[in-house]
Amino acid sequence: IDPLLRALGWNTSDPDQVWPEYKVNHSERKRADYALCKDGKIVALIEAKRVGTTSQPSKLARAKNQVTRYSRHLKIPLLIVTDGGGWFVYNMRNGRRKATEVLVIDFQTGKIKALVNKFMLLAPENIGEL
């Protein structure tokens, strides 16, 4: 995940941009795998899963539910579930209770040019557009 975030322009060694193991609740042990930050605000949460998770609907649904709960608690509108090969991006803007799928990037089945164009939507300068 880190190499892909760096390729997008995120500085994974700067916690002001990428905060690994972000605590969802200080009294519990729940953590989002990454919080992406821009201009001092968290703009997205990433839940990283084992390779193959995104190709299994039941496991993808569990991961989506997990990161949705984190998003509700923290009031973060953009959620990402990835296993590195598949990136599923959801939006909970405007007070939505359910996460709406806004972008799917499947590196195993897509054409490279289209994938790169989609993937660049997750770059720091573009992420607010989703």
Image (tube, rainbow, N blue to C red):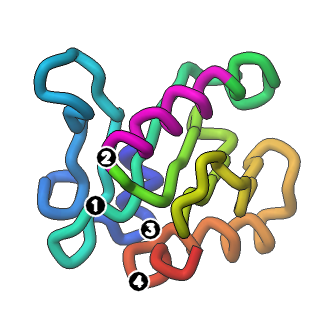
Question: Which kind of residue does numbered mark 3 sit on?
Answer: Leu
Q: Is residue 8 magenta?
A: no
Q: Is residue 100 left or right of residue 78?
A: right
Check disc 3: other Cα within 10 Å, few if <14, some if 14-19, many if 20+.
some
Q: Which residue is mark 3?
A: 8
Q: Which mark is residue 74?
A: 2
Q: Give the alpha-carbon distance from disc 3 to disc 1, as whole Å.
A: 17 Å
Q: What range is drawn magenta here?
A: 62-74
**Residue 94, placed above or below residue 107:** below
Secondary structure beneath label 2: helix
Q: Main secondary structure of the magenta part?
A: helix
Q: Is residue 69 magenta?
A: yes
**Residue 8, placed above or below residue 72:** below
Mark positioned earlier in the residue sequence (3 or 1): 3
Residue 121 found in image quarter: bottom right
User: Where residue 56 appears, x then y in whole percent?
Assistant: 79, 21
